Image: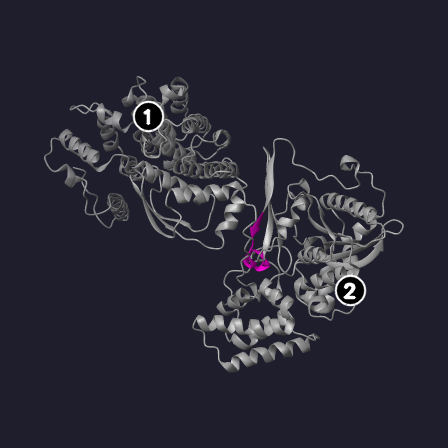
């Protein structure tokens, strides 16, 4: 934020400090007038010092807004931030006016990658929380809703006379009641060294310093101290910090937009409603209010809202009346917005008006209010000068899309079965992973199991594509490298959330990046090693195992990365399930599917991947014999050992699972893991599992059967319809009955309801007999 005052730094060193609120037209006017009046030798601006030797690039002649995009990456930290400029940014006016009057220009702040900016996405973010209490008192004193309204009242629509003194008083008050943290202190110490160096070099010529108003009081004090910091090559100028060895980073100019600049869309710096302040900068508050009133009315009419000429006149009249009532010589932004609401919104509003607070626009706002906010936000998008350097990725993508005939807008269909189609698919998926606008997949395989051989994409080109590509250049110089780095970052963010890791893995397969990045493998392996959700791990394992075994289409068959994932998932699933404890409960199908995927991995990938079958069998044996383990896991563990070839006595195991509260869940685990084995051992005399099970169920009392029935039904759902028909046929044979097994499976009502009804009837009969209302039936 802002304030201005001249001060001396050392004997005869004339330095003028102008504290500014970022993106404030009033501060921009003050900066321009001060530089024009002083004709300084140096203009020092709060900006990244490592971009200082590229100021000619920044001043090429772009269409604003633009931003310096800075990125940084090392083994422990990934950081990206922006330093945006629009026509009314005081920093921009300082640079352009300083250049016009022959001043030497310097950026004097620490680079964006520096740890002092670790928590910031934007260099020019106003840290309102640092002085929340003083601004709250000021808002109460001036009877305004928030800091933005207070700022307009004090500076934007007030007279310019005395502006410098008012700004200085405001920021002295703010800084006087606030303390700078270590990050601000490091920045201020560094900026003070630039100020001392410039003052020494300028002699008696003026120096103008333009920084955030919060920093101005501290810089005035620090600039007068002796400089003990190192200077390069014996000069008086501070050394520009460089990224540490092994780190990657850099800065590029990107087109910016008013939408990204607006605090109503989440930008936490500067001013809301950038289109309003652009109009105020260009023509003053009266012209801004008049032009934007017409813009709002036009937008509402385009959306079939009835707005008459009388409504338009009423809006202007109310705006002017509110301005006079609030003591404004000219209408402020909130005068305009409140006047528009009063004239054009006749419905009751369910929530406070968005400009009464700071931050993103809340959902559910009145449609007309949304249009007002959008109109004052504006849709301006910057454009870079054609001679602006771009990161290598921009050129690589252009070349790749032209080579693959993907450089035209429209609908594209690609076949995954031919080599060219696969290359086109991978390029488009890499752009999708990098979140490049205008690349939308309409259809295609959503999972590894889908036999979809074709994709349909819609391509479009707009103003937001180039900024996104430039920013994606932080990931790598080529499309493949950038996509792999982005996937690695997503894998890191996913941590041990196995479900999110599965999505990253499938995207890696679609992008053709499965074995490109060793870091992806390491990151995902670490995430799997810390995963705690057995069901999610099972989904990852099932997906990856299918791709590893069969996928010749996407090129993931026998992938090293997927092999690492399979090994990690098998180890982690077995470790987790052995620690699960619990009594009778509904079978957990997700963990049963996870154990089934583990079985498949041990059956089909043990030899090539070196999976330890013996260790798995040992785990299965311990779980199946552990009475503290849940019944479904004990049954699944027994089935795992059986399916892997262990010699077992299944009949004895089934009898050991007897009990209406546990039998069904135990069988669910068994059938999930060893369904084929259960059917294979059945003999005509019914000596197998199903025959013994038939005997046990028939022997259950009616109440016990009712308890066991839901879990039994769930267990037998692991058999597909054809196999259930075979089982039904064998049950008929055991009873010497003839009939259709298929018909036996097609009951007219839900079997569970039938069983409950039968039990209810038995209870009623018992009560009637007990009360002597009906005679007791002869059991014969």
Please tell me whether residue 661 is drawn above or below residue 756 in the rendered image: above
Q: Position of residue 448 (x, y in %)?
A: 35, 37
Q: Nearer the viewer, residue 46 or 301?
A: 46
Q: CA distance from mark 2 to mark 1?
A: 81 Å
From the viewer's side, name the closer residue of 15 and 651.
15
The segment highlighted magenta reads 253-264
Q: Which residue is mark 1?
A: 639
Q: Residue at x 15, y 39 (%)?
A: 742
Q: Is residue 761 magenta?
A: no
Which quadrant of the view contains residue 607? top left
Q: Observer-nearest residue: 329 or 86?
A: 86
Residue 25 in percent (x, y) is at: 67, 63
Query: Does residue 265 appear in the picture of this structure?
Result: yes
State the mark number for residue 166: 2
- Horizontally, is 632 left or right of 336 in the view? left
Crowd around label 2: few <14 · some 14–19 · many ≥20 (10 Å): some
Q: Which mark is residue 392?
A: none
How packed mark 1 is, by other alpha carbons closer than 10 Å (few <14, some 14-19, many 20 or more), is many
Point out residue 562 in the picture as x, y percentages from the top left corner: 41, 29
Q: Is residue 254 highlighted in magenta?
A: yes
For residue 332, above or below residue 247: below
């Amino acid at each position: 934020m802002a304030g201005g005052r001249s001060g001396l730094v050392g004997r005869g060193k004339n330095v003028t400090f102008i504290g500014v609120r970022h993106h404030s037209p009033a501060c921009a006017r003050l900066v321009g007038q001060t530089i024009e009046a002083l004709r300084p030798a140096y203009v020092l601006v709060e900006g990244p010092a490592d971009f200082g030797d590229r100021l000619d690039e920044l001043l090429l002649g772009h269409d604003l807004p633009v931003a310096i995009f800075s990125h940084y990456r090392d083994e422990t930290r990934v950081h990206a931030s922006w330093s945006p400029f629009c026509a009314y940014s005081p920093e921009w006016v300082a640079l352009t006016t300083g250049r016009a009057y022959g001043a030497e220009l310097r950026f004097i702040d620490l680079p964006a990658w520096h740890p002092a900016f670790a928590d910031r996405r934007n260099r020019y973010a106003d840290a309102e929380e640092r002085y929340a209490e003083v601004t709250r008192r000021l808002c109460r004193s001036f009877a305004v809703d928030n800091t933005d309204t207070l700022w307009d009242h004090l500076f934007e629509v007030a007279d310019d006379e005395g502006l410098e003194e008012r700004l200085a008083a405001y920021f002295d008050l703010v800084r006087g009641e606030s303390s700078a943290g270590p990050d601000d202190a490091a920045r201020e110490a560094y900026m003070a060294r630039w100020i001392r160096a410039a003052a020494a070099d300028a002699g008696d010529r003026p120096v103008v310093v333009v920084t955030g108003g919060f920093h101005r009081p501290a810089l005035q004090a620090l600039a007068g101290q002796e400089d003990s910091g190192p200077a390069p090559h014996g000069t008086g100028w501070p050394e520009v910090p460089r990224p540490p060895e092994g780190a990657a980073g850099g800065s590029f100019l990107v087109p910016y937009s008013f939408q990204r600049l607006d605090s109503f869309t989440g930008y936490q710096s500067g001013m809301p409603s950038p289109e309003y302040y652009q109009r105020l900068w260009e023509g003053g508050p009266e012209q801004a209010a008049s032009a934007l009133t017409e813009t709002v009315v036009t937008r509402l009419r385009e959306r079939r809202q009835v707005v008459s000429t009388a409504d338009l006149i009423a809006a202007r009249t109310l705006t002017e009346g509110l301005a006079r009532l609030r003591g404004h010589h000219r209408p402020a932004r909130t005068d305009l917005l409140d006047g528009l609401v009063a004239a054009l919104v006749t419905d009751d509003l369910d929530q406070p008006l968005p400009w009464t607070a700071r931050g993103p626009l809340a959902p559910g706002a009145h449609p007309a209010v949304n249009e007002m906010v959008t109109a004052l936000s504006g849709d301006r998008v910057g454009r870079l000068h054609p001679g602006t350097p771009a990161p290598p990725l921009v050129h690589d993508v252009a070349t790749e899309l032209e080579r693959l005939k993907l450089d035209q807008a429209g609908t594209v269909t690609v076949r995954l079965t031919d080599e060219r189609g696969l290359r086109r698919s991978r390029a488009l998926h890499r752009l999708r992973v990098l979140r490049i606008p205008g690349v939308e997949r309409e259809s295609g395989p959503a999972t590894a199991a889908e036999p979809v051989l074709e994709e349909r994409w819609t391509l479009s080109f707009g103003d937001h594509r180039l900024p996104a590509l430039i920013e994606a250049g932080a990931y790598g110089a080529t499309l493949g490298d950038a996509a792999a780095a982005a996937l690695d970052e997503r894998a890191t963010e996913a941590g041990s959330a196995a479900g999110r890791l599965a999505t990253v893995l499938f995207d890696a397969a679609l992008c053709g990046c499965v074995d490109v990045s060793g870091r992806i493998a390491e990151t995902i392996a670490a995430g799997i090693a810390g995963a705690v959700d057995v069901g999610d791990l099972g989904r990852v394992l099932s997906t990856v195992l299918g791709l590893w075994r069969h996928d010749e289409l996407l090129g993931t068959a026998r992938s090293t990365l997927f092999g690492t994932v399979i090994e990690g998932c098998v180890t982690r699933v077995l470790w987790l399930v052995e620690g699960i404890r619990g009594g009778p409960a509904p079978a957990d199908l997700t963990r049963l599917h996870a154990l089934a995927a583990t079985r498949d991995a041990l059956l089909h990938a043990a030899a090539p991947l070196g999976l330890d079958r013996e260790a798995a069998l040992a785990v299965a044996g311990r779980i199946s014999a552990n009475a503290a383990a849940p019944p479904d896991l004990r049954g699944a563990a027994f089935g795992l050992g059986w399916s892997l070839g262990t010699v077992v006595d299944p009949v004895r195991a089934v009898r050991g699972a007897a009990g209406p509260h546990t039998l069904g869940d135990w069988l669910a685990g068994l059938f999930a893991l060893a369904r084929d084995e259960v059917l294979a051992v059945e003999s005509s005399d019914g000596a197998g599992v199903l025959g013994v099970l038939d005997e046990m169920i028939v022997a259950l009392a009616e109440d016990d059967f009712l308890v066991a029935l839901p879990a039994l039904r769930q267990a037998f759902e692991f058999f597909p319809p054809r196999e259930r028909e075979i089982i039904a046929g064998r049950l008929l044979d055991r009873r010497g009955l003839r009939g259709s097994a298929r018909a036996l499976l097609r009951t007219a009502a839900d079997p569970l309801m039938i069983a409950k009804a039968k039990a209810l009837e038995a209870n009623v009969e018992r009560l009637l007999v007990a009360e002597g209302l009906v005679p007791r039936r002869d059991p014969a």
